[in-house]
Image (cartoon, helix red, strand yellow):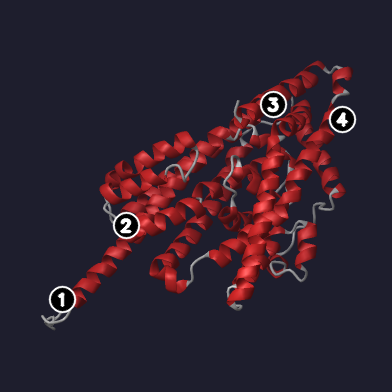
Amino acid sequence: MSLTTKVLIALTLGLALGMGISATGNTTLAGLVPIIEPVGTLWINAIRMTVIPLVVGSIIVGVTSAPDARTIGRIGGRALVLFLVLLLAGGVFTALVAPPLFNLIPLDPDAIATLRATASNAAQAAGESVKRVPTFTQWLVDLVPTNPVKAAADGAMLPLIVFSVVFGLAITRIPAEGRALLERFFRGVADTALTLVRWVLILAPIGVFALAVPLASRLGLSAAGALAGYIIVTAAVTTVFTVVVLYPLASIVGRINIGEFARGVFPAQAVAFSARSSLAALPAMMESARTRLKLPEQIVSFFLPLAASTFRFGGTLGITCGVLFIARLYGVELATAQLATVVLTVTVTTFSIPGIPAGSIVAMVPVLLAAGVPVEGMGVLLGVDTIPDMFRTTSNVTGDMAAAVVLGRGEKEVGSESTSVGSGGVEPDPTSPG
């Protein structure tokens, strides 16, 4: 039995028990809640324990191991700009569209008040109580931490990410011997943290069950409806962004017929939707890019493998949806500054999503911490992640292919200019080689 199946069963059992406790009002059953709840908290703490080394190590390794400008050339530079723009666009789109949709999900106000009180107590115990919403100036100043260690201890993820990026860039400027040493060190940190995450996820069925019981006991029957609403909204937001933004991007900027692009990307989408893996869809992406879309070979052989393993548009949409849903579930009002923090943190965090089942859910933890939203809600989303993950992965692949078409168009134009220059008025020397 797969881990996904085990987690789904555990979630179903936990919700059933919790809703039974809520419906019957049985005091004996209600006495189980304070016994079960700490188990879920322990599991969440175990995941949080791995977040700092995983994020810091992954980001520094990603920065230091990326080819420099001489190797990447124009493809790498244009790709980075394009991906950052699309990731930010996806985050902003979700932050604007998802909250009104989540507000349509009916929840008992008394249950939300209880959840909010529980989350507030847990946050204070963990040293991350909800703070006064900062002004934009203060938020901007806080992006650069005066003490990175304190930022890590406080769970201030966005300043810590800024430090990690800058530190990684600094490593690329030191002598080769020291650079190689630090690269190996931080790669070891990231790999070790990823191993810890895998160990913690083995216990996911227990943790999800222990989180679902108290949640359902407080929300009652609305718990099941809320999770169903989360799945529907996430699937809808991901699909709409893919269709409204990515397809026109490929057609207009990449100058390709939208039907031709749709036919070219469909085989990879089918693999992504069923396998829930961008890397599993990579062979289909490369084949379609080469034979159907006729993209330049440098795009097929260099850009697509890089994109499939690094850039995740669907992760931006899915993680932002998850954070906004948990905020709704726990009655947390996100101000503009907090929404901006969510979008920026998600944009950077997607580059370090671990390549493991439920990797996007695990990557949601630093975003929740940065926004001041209870981390406990993440465990419940893990149990229903299969369907949202299908849509996220399909969006990932579609975004990779759309970006490949856009960059491929630029490469063709550069090639045409080179050919034009090369075919100018100077005749080639017939005695020269080649």
Taking depth in this image into account, of 117 and 173 the one nearest to the observer is 173
Residue type highlighted by circle 3:
Ala
Q: Are marks 2 and 1 in contact (CB under 8 Å)?
A: no
Residue type highlighted by circle 2:
Gly
Residue tagged 3: 10
Q: Which element is circle 1 on? A: loop
Q: Quadrant of the C terminus?
A: bottom left
Taking depth in this image into account, of 138 and 372 the one nearest to the observer is 372
Q: Earlier in the sequence, mark 3 or mark 2?
A: 3
Q: Earlier in the sequence, mark 1 or mark 3?
A: 3
3 over 146 or under it: above or below? above
Q: Earlier in the sequence, mark 2 or mark 1?
A: 2
Q: Is residue 298 left or right of residue 319?
A: left
Residue tagged 2: 254
Percent coordinates x, y for residue 216 in the rendering = 74, 27
Residue at 57% x, 65% y: name it.
63
Percent coordinates x, y for residue 207 in the rendering = 74, 34
* Separation of residues labelled 3 and 2 (CA atoms): 46 Å
Residue tagged 1: 423
Residue tagged 4: 34
Q: Earlier in the sequence, mark 4 or mark 1?
A: 4
* Separation of residues labelled 2 and 1 (CA atoms): 26 Å
Q: Which element is circle 3 on? A: helix
Q: Are marks 4 and 3 in contact (CB under 8 Å)?
A: no
Q: Quadrant of the N terminus?
A: top right
